[in-house]
Amino acid sequence: MAMFKAAVFDWAGTTVDFGSFAPMGVFVKAFAEFGIEATIAQARAPMGAPKWDHIRAMMDMPEIAQQWQAKYGTAPSDQDVDKVYEIFVPMNEKVAADYAQLVPGCKEAIDTLREMGLKIGSTTGYTRSIMENVLPVAAAQGYEPDNLICADDLPEGRPGPLGMYKCMVDLVAYPPAAIIKVDDTEPGIKEGVAAGCVTVGVALSGNAVGKTPEELAAMDPSDVDVLRQQATEILKAAGADHVIDTVADLPALVRRLQG
C-alpha cells in the first residue's frame, strides 16, 4: 500500500502563474484607488494568505499605515480593509485568468502522481469568485484537481489547518501524514504543518523568487542558485519538510520518500 494517499496543491506560484504575478499589480492598483502608494515588494510580502488578511497585513506595514494616517487622519481600520478588499477582488477576477498558464511540467507531474495512486486536492488564498475565472483555463490545459478549497469557503483560512481538514474529507484521504501539501508561500506551508501533513515547498516557480521561466533561463546559474537558496530558507523557516524547484520535481521526490 502506498505511503501517500493524496497531494494537495496551491495554485498561483505552484501549479499556475509561474512567479506568482497575477495579484501583484492589482494590490498596487487597489491601494492607488485610495491615494496610497504601495510597492510590488510590499504586495509580495504576505502572499499566500487569504486576500482580506493580505490587505490587512499590508495596511499594518509602517510605510502604508503612515500614508493612510496622513491622508485620512486615522490608522487603517478593519472597515478600511473591507473597502480596499471590495476594490481588489473584482480587479483580480479580471486578470487572474490571464496568468493561469500551467507551470511547465505540472500536468505531467499530476498525471504521474495519479498513476501512482494519489488523489489530487487544492487550496488557495484566492476567493471562489476569482478561482471561477482560473478553473476553466487550467482545465483547458488538462489540470482539474479533485477538489478546491478557497479562502472564503471556511470560517478561517491559512495559516490555519481547516482547508487541509476539508481536503481530507473531500478526498477521503487520511491520516494527515499520508497527505503531501505543496505550496510556494509561508502561509501555505504553515497550513500543511498545522494539519500535520508532509510539506513540500516549491522554490523557483514561487512568490519568493518572482521570476518568469524566461527570466530565470537568461540568468547565470549561480545567480539562480542564490534565489533558490533564499526561497528555500523562507520555506524551510515556515516548516517545509522538503523543497524542490517546481511541481515538476514532485513525482521523483514522492518515489524517493516511498522508497
Image (tube, rainbow, N blue to C red):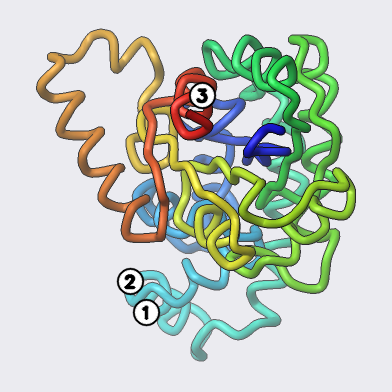
Q: Position of residue 73 (x, y in %)?
A: 49, 89
> Counting residues from the N terminus, which is met first, the one under dot 1 or under dot 3?
1
Pointer 2 local density, CA inside 10 Å: few below 14, some 14–19, many at least 20 = some
Looking at the picture, tell me which residue is in the foreground, 157 or 90: 157
Q: Nearer the viewer, mark 1 or mark 3?
A: 3
The N terminus lies in which quarter of the figure?
top right
Q: Position of residue 52 (x, y in %)?
A: 66, 65
221 vs 43, nearest the viewer = 221
Of 59 and 189, the residue lying toward us: 189
Amino acid bearing label 2 = Glu
Q: Nearer the viewer, mark 2 or mark 3?
A: 3
Residue at figure coordinates x 42%, y 50% from the top left: 44
Q: Which residue is mark 3?
A: 255
Q: Nearer the viewer, residue 218 or 89?
A: 218
Where residue 14 sits in the image (x, y, percent)? 54, 33
List the residue tagged with mark 1. Answer: 66
Q: How far is mark 2 from mark 3, CA to CA? A: 46 Å
For label 3, the SS is helix
* Secondary structure category for the residue under label 1: helix
Tell me the amino acid under the disc marked 1: Gln
Q: CA distance from mark 1 to mark 3?
A: 51 Å
Dot 2 corresponds to which residue? 63
Residue occupying the point 47% across, 59% down: 46
Q: Is residue 245 above or below residue 77?
A: above
Q: Picture quarter containing residue 103?
A: top right
Whether the residues at callouts 2 and 1 have beta carbons within 8 Å, the answer is yes
Count the marks: 3
Q: Which residue lies at the image location 61% right of the left edge and 53% below the top edge?
A: 177
Q: Secondary structure at mark 2?
A: helix
